[in-house]
Image (cartoon, helix red, strand yellow):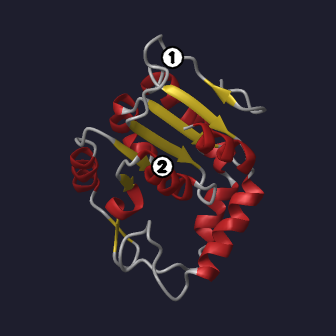
Amino acid sequence: MIPRRGFAYRIVPKGREGVMRRVLIIGNSGGGKSTLARRLGDKLGLPVIHLDVLFWKPGWVESDRDDYRTRVMAALQAPAWICDGQFPSTFHLRMPMSDTIVWIDQPRTLCLCRAIWRAVTYRDGGRPDMAEGCREKIDFAFYRYIWTFDRRVRPEVEAALAEHGAHARLFHLRNDREIAAFLAQA
């Protein structure tokens, strides 16, 4: 189990300390995954893959499961990338290819507030990290997902990290200060 307090990271084998070419950013919605992905991509000069862009079709229509997996695998064939998005159904594809995994683990109240703020802020236009034709909206099912993330999704994340991500350097970031510190040292 991953500790819940303090800036945490997993030690990797000697010689891989500075390698950050395939970075996976996961965590609850509204926690700051896409913002960190964009900033880290700019800093490291790496392309950013937003899984929401690959998954959603206009009008919030979900992609076919096999089609989505094919698009994810095609995107991950690049030699270097930053990939942001939760989507546990593809952890087994993404985690083994990652040299660095960043788990943004912000408090659910903050995540919920940010998701609501995002819906209000972007209601008239699309976000740069979202598929075209998916306008922000007030969505109580989505907010319920955020609120129950720790109880329902956290065990899945921890199991996937143990099974598919043990080789990678893991940064478990729990607040904006830790995210800023991670970005500064990247």
Task: Kindly identify the residue that appears in the image at 71 percent across and 42 percent down.
Answer: 178
Query: In the current view of this chain or complex, which residue is farthest to the top?
Result: 14
Q: Secondary structure at mark 2?
A: helix
Q: Amino acid at mark 1?
A: Val
The residue at which mark 1 appears reads as 12
User: Few, some or many C-alpha atoms within 10 Å of disc 1 (few <14, some 14-19, many ≥20)?
Assistant: some
Q: Secondary structure at mark 1?
A: loop
Residue 11's spot in the image, x, y percent? 57, 17
Task: Kindly identify the residue that appears in the image at 38 percent across and 37 percent down.
Answer: 22
Task: Kindly identify the residue that appears in the image at 39 percent across and 55 percent down.
Answer: 51
Residue 182 appears left or right of 66: right
Residue 148's spot in the image, x, y percent? 68, 52
Is any atom of residue 85 visible in this view? no
Q: Amino acid at mark 2?
A: Lys
The image quadrant that residue 147 belongs to is bottom right
Residue 43, which numbered label?
2
Residue 81's spot in the image, x, y percent? 35, 44
Task: Kindly identify the residue that appears in the image at 44 percent across and 51 percent down.
Answer: 41
Q: Quadrant of the C terminus?
A: top right
